[in-house]
Amino acid sequence: MTSNNHVSEEKWWKRSVIYQIYPRSFCDGNGDGIGDLEGIISKLDYLEQLGVDAIWLSPVCRSPQDDNGYDISDYQDIDPMFGTLEDMDRLIAEAKKRSIRIIMDLVLNHSSDEHPWFLEARKSRENPYHDYYVWRDGTPEMPPNEMRAAFGGSAWEWEPQVQQYYFHQFSVKQPDLNWENPKLRREIYDMINWWIARGVGGFRLDVIDQIAKEPDQGITSNGPRLHEYLQELSRETFQKADLVTVGEAWGATPELAMRYSNPDQSELSMVFQFEHICLDQMEGKEKWDLAPLPFLKFKEVFNRWQTKLHGTGWNSLFWNNHDLPRIVSRWGNDSQYRVESAKMLAILLHGMQGTPYIYQGEELGMTNVRCPIEAYQDIETRNLYRERLEQGYGEAEVMESIYAKSRDNARTPMQWSNEANAGFTTGEPWLSVNPNYHEINARSQVEDADSVFHCYRRLIRLRKEYRVFAEGDFRMLLKEDAAVFAYTRNSREGQLLVVCNFYGKDADCAIREPWDSMELLAGNYKEPLQLLPEGGISLRPYEARMYWKESGKACQ
Ligand code: GLC
Ligand code: CA
């Protein structure tokens, strides 16, 4: 009965915008150089001004920090580095006062090797916790198979005490949990319900498509029992409250996403899919093997996801997160046209159907960094550097890959002001701040009505004012145009039109519209639109415009 009610009412997260915080890099409240909950609380007014509806917090639970918190040793406590459970309760309450919900990061594919479950599990094969993890027989010289871990090396680690290997898809300190064990699943559900009772507004589920692994068959993502597990998980936890849930699913296709985000709510609200994100790498290779973005393919990918999920599921919309390089450096221009291109990328994405996610600093147009290798802290980057040099790659080439794709690009501290350390900390920051904070920082952008910040703020507000963002269909225009990304969204009330020049050169295109009678909702140039004498328009470098045409006017 309750679930029927849930289906008919409009979901709050369909008109929401979610802001991701990477806690260690957001704001340091106590001067130890590491961001914390106190720091986040002190910036809630800023987030309220931006207008976001929810904050997704990357993990803050107790953790040895081998992978910056994605290796959890106690799911029901806060890491002392970030604060206490009381601070967390205060964050939830203070955010609520500003109508902001707190979304937690659930890392359910693996735990830390320092989690009490694993400490027990590795003691003996008879231990009741042994089966919470994935073990296989072998000899120290002969792992069960050739599977590799995402952060390099074998996916199997020998444990002398039990004379077996344990399976880890990420680092050796992140042993995979065995979802086949019903007791483990029950413990996970109880833990999630405990957080729901504390008042959290939803969850982001880390690498959720990898929980149903079948290592004997070499299967990591999309294992045969995945959707069975997800449905049980959802039934036992999420469906009991009005939550948003978003699963990280690198292997999702639109067809799979329709299952994950089925409007009957049997699994999740939506997934993060990465098809657009993986386009600028050599086919069949890794993200480090750089390739230019194939623009027509990129448009085709968005077109497919937007049209297939319309009415059948729900999209997430994002350019950035804590694992990805900064979008303005990646697909915009972080020098001459930094402001224009950051706004263009925002307008392009925020006009689509789905729930937009903004990663901290994206709303300022923060950029990538280039550091000497010693300055990088990320485990993936460090391992990659070592591994590729061993394999004979040249140092310069490896560094180019790191500059382009290292996760630390996203993890440099948030740039609050032009004070020391960008106002992030009064101490020594755990990762150096990007030296461009004098030019790029929140304080100056909040004061400047023309800033990237205010462009994001406007886009967030528009999503609440116009139903077309949540409801309209999607039609890609100029599919074959090599520089322009343009589309319409139609709903009962009218039509939204978005036209963007994706590159730094002028671009002419043949779109003919009653430009003067339409309302300009957002744009990145003050000058009027340039009309071509023969019809059509000419867009300046990275020029982007979002127009609205009300239904009555549409057929005049
Ligand atoms: C996800 C997280 C990433 C983490 C990995 C292992 O991809 O986003 O930061 O390293 O899972 O938990
Ligand atoms: Ca701190």
Image (tube, rainbow, N blue to C red):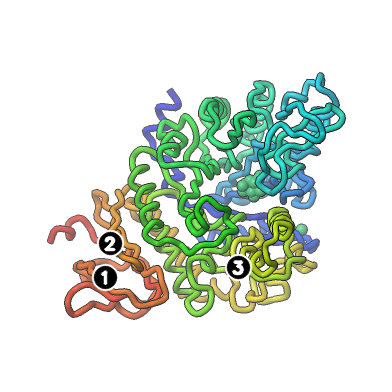
Amino acid type at image mark 3: Asn
Work out whether residue 151 or residue 236 is closer to the camera in this orientation and state it: 151
Where does residue 408 sit, x and y in percent of width and height?
66, 61
Task: Please tell me whether mark 3 sits on a helix, a strand or a loop.
Answer: loop
Residue at 61% across, 42% down: 206
Label disc, if present, on residue 345 of the rendered structure: none
Residue 491 located left or right of residue 526: left
Kindly check if marks 1 and 2 are in contact, taking CB atoms under 8 A apart as contact. Answer: yes
Where does residue 118 sit, x and y in percent of width and height?
78, 32
Where does residue 33 sit, x and y in percent of width and height?
77, 63
Where does residue 292 sit, x and y in percent of width and height?
48, 64
Q: Is residue 475 visible?
A: yes
The quarter of the rendered structure image containing the N terminus is: top left
Amino acid type at image mark 1: Cys
Circle 3 residue:
368
Work out whether residue 461 or residue 335 is closer to the camera in this orientation and state it: 335
Residue at 73% across, 70% down: 372
Separation of marks 2 and 3 at Cα, in angstroms: 31 Å
In the image, residue 537 above or below residue 271: below
Amino acid type at image mark 2: Leu
In the image, residue 356 above or below residue 528: above
Task: Please tell me whether mark 1 sits on a helix, a strand or a loop.
Answer: strand
Work out whether residue 417 or residue 372 is closer to the camera in this orientation and state it: 372
Circle 1 residue:
509
Residue at 58% across, 61% down: 325
Residue 45 located left or right of residue 158: left
As drawn, which residue projects farthest toward the top? 126
Indicate which disc, 1 or 2, sits on the residue closer to the N terminus: 2
In the image, residue 383 above or below residue 367: above
Indicate which disc, 1 or 3, sits on the residue closer to the N terminus: 3
Label disc, if present, on residue 478 of the rendered structure: 2
Residue at 36% across, 48% down: 304
